[in-house]
Image (cartoon, rainbow, N blue to C red):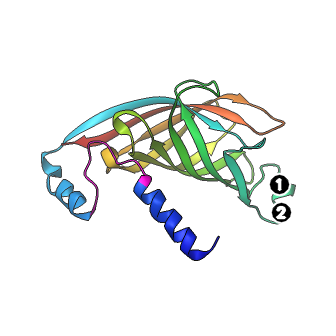
Amino acid sequence: MEKKSLVLLLCFIVMAMPMVKGVELGPKAVEKWFENLSHAKQKVTRFHFYFHDIVSGKNPTAIQIAQSNTTAKSPTLFGFVAMIDDPLTVGPEPNSTIVGRAQGIYGSADQKEAALLMNLNFVFTTGKYNGSTLSVLGRNPVFNQYREMPIVGGSGVFRLAQGIATAKTVWFNLTSGDAVVEYNVIVRHYSH
């Protein structure tokens, strides 16, 4: 694709993106939001959804982007890195209603245990949180029944958010590597 076409495509994508509901965007709006922060009340919001990590088939939602020259010899795939754009759904079924996307990177970061470093955003695409995000940065020991990862921030309605995402694998195909993970998220954020 030539440079001019790429620039036009990027401009179209930016203009077509949904606006964050209930929150003004832009530097001046953020500055005003911070000025009013002392009057804001803290609020707790809870989410329950399912993360569909599909690495197989014609339309994977997670693809390998890197590995070290020793990854294949490692029992934990240490050094493996994947980029994801996984659907977040109301239920565990693949055709369940989509409420958002999990977009980011995970990589095998432990030489002795299957544990991922997760660096991703939960991007909400429906309802009152449409266009807002929550950012996850943490360790995910994938074979533990429950895993806890910190919510370290967010955007839109979730500016300055803090919280915890608890993950539990619902389904995992050892052959394909596909998985469905249940998430319970509790987050503290501000409302004006």
Q: Type of residue at label 2?
A: Thr
Q: Type of residue at label 1?
A: Ser
Q: Report the number of discs.
A: 2
Q: Main secondary structure of the magenta part?
A: loop
Q: Relative to 164, is 93 above or below? A: above
- Where does residue 55 sit, x and y in percent of width and height? 74, 44
Residue position marked by numbered label 1 in the rendering: 74
**Looking at the image, which residue is at 43% across and 53% down?**
16
Relative to residue 42, is residue 69 drawn left or right? right
Mark number for residue 169? none
- Where does residue 46 sit, x and y in percent of width and height? 39, 30
Query: Magenta stretch?
Result: 16-26
**Looking at the image, which residue is at 12% across and 46% down?**
39
Relative to residue 147, is residue 20 drawn left or right? left
Residue position marked by numbered label 2 in the rendering: 70
Question: Which quadrant of the view contains residue 142?
Answer: top right
